Image (spheres, rainbow, N blue to C red):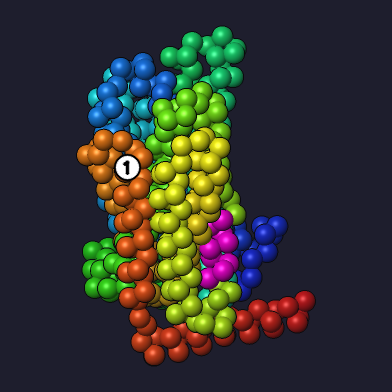
Amino acid sequence: MSSNLHAQKATKISLFSFSSAAMRAFHMSWLAFFVCFFAWFACAPLMPVIAGEFNLTKAQIANINIAAVAITILVRLIVGPLCDKYGPRKTYSALLIIGSIPVFGVAASNSYESFLFFRLLIGAIGASFVITQYHTSIMFAPNVVGTANAASAGWGNAGGGATQALMPLLLAALVMFGVEQAMGWRIALIVPGVMMVIVGILYWKLTQDCPQGNFKELREQGLNVGSDKKGGMAILLHAAKNYRVWILFGAYAACFGIEIFIHNIVAMYYVDNFQFGLKEAGLAAGIFGLLALFARALGGIVSDRVALSKGLDGRTKVLFLMILLEGVFLVVFSQMNSAMLAILTMTVFALFTHMACGATYALVPFIDRDALGGVAGIIGAGGNVGAVAAGFLLKGMLDIQTTLMVLGGLVVIAASCVLMIRFSVEHKEKEQRLFEQAVQDRNLADAQN
């Protein structure tokens, strides 16, 4: 078995293949992320019904939305180093199976307090994203890692859109079969919990930690895999010393943070501002999330393409442009007064938001190879810090339109910070060599086929 860990990474994405370890990890990681995202936001499109049942005030709904994304910050920071230590396979299987417990808890809650408590715990499954990115980063070579990261994250993210569209339909179907609405939303919420348990078992059975096998066995053979830094804290501190990590932390707050915030509020926004019904609002909100199916991957693909000629600086500029356009269209979206124009501008804004997310994680594997879990964890947590900050901003402001406009301005500021990222000549040359090696390996493999 080769100890050169770069040599066996996949240099291309063969979508319909399940035979290679890399493609199994790719498909299982986006599926696991999809199911986690689906469960994470399953409550959001049903909030108008749940709010009615528990007589929730506006402040209580805001608290529930903040709770849903707050704990994720902490868990994302822990989960990155856990991947370095125990491997993504064990970490993901555990997260899926343990994470299903609060999903069942939310379905059983009978007061604002119990609902808030379980909603807070559900936030932990939002950390699934870091494991998805870690697993694809470790499996794919530099020439396709941007695309692999962005596609797996994008398809997983689409779970947030799918849940907006499907949960109201599931509830409507249950009511049609004579189930009381108060019972219906509870049964509907059990579905994602069951899905998590099934995918957790499949993840354990079908994947391995890295191209060579599982961390535990490889370490027993004396191979150095994951991170050689002893504790999770050391991995995190090593990553935290890198200023680029913090700029990307802000960038990710500006794209993914806004995305999560929109998932939580957009169905209610269409109901309150444009008098949509629950199903229409769910479908309109679903557009925002479902765009992730291709838009996030597009961000990664553009980054990989530009990197061919412009290297790492090219990846940085792509990210700057995406976040800038996202901010501009968010401001435009906030000013729309007709439902049609609101949906149209939201679609354009969503496109750039998802592409910015993809472009961020197309840059992540190149920041510091020695602390990948720490880097992915801190930047991933940035997304949730953004969502929590947006939640508090909304709570402090009078209306959602003003909040969206202010957020748009903040996104533009975050974009300009991205331009401050610089890489040393040595760093660029080293990454360029790895990149060219991967392209060569791919061409060689193509020639042999």
Is residue 344 rendered to the left or right of residue 131? Answer: right
Read off the magenta span. Answer: 295-303
Which residue corresponds to the image point at 55% horizontal and 44% vertical from the top-left?
A: 344
| Closest to the observer, 106 or 234 | 106
| Above or below 282: residue 110 | above
Which residue corresponds to the image point at 56% horizontal and 69% vertical from the top-left?
A: 302
Q: Secondary structure at mark 1?
A: helix
Q: Is residue 296 magenta?
A: yes
Q: Is residue 138 magenta?
A: no
Which residue corresponds to the image point at 53% horizontal and 71% vertical from the top-left?
A: 303
Determine if residue 133 is in view.
no
| Closest to the observer, 59 or 128 | 59
Query: Outermost residue, right direction?
Result: 449
Q: In the picture, residue 429 is in which quadrant?
A: bottom left
| Above or below 262: residue 76 | below
| Quarter in which the N terminus is drawn | bottom right
Count neighbours of disc 1 (C-alpha within 10 A) and say few if under 14, some if 14 to 19, many if 20 or more: some
| Closest to the observer, 195 or 65 | 65
Is residue 341 rendered to the left or right of residue 81? Answer: right
| Quarter in which the C terminus is drawn | bottom right
In the rendering, at what x and y percent does residue 178 appear?
A: 56, 9
In the rendering, at what x and y percent does residue 296 appear?
A: 53, 57
The prevailing secondary structure element of the residues shown in magenta is helix
Residue designated by label 1: 402
| Above or below 180: residue 208 | below
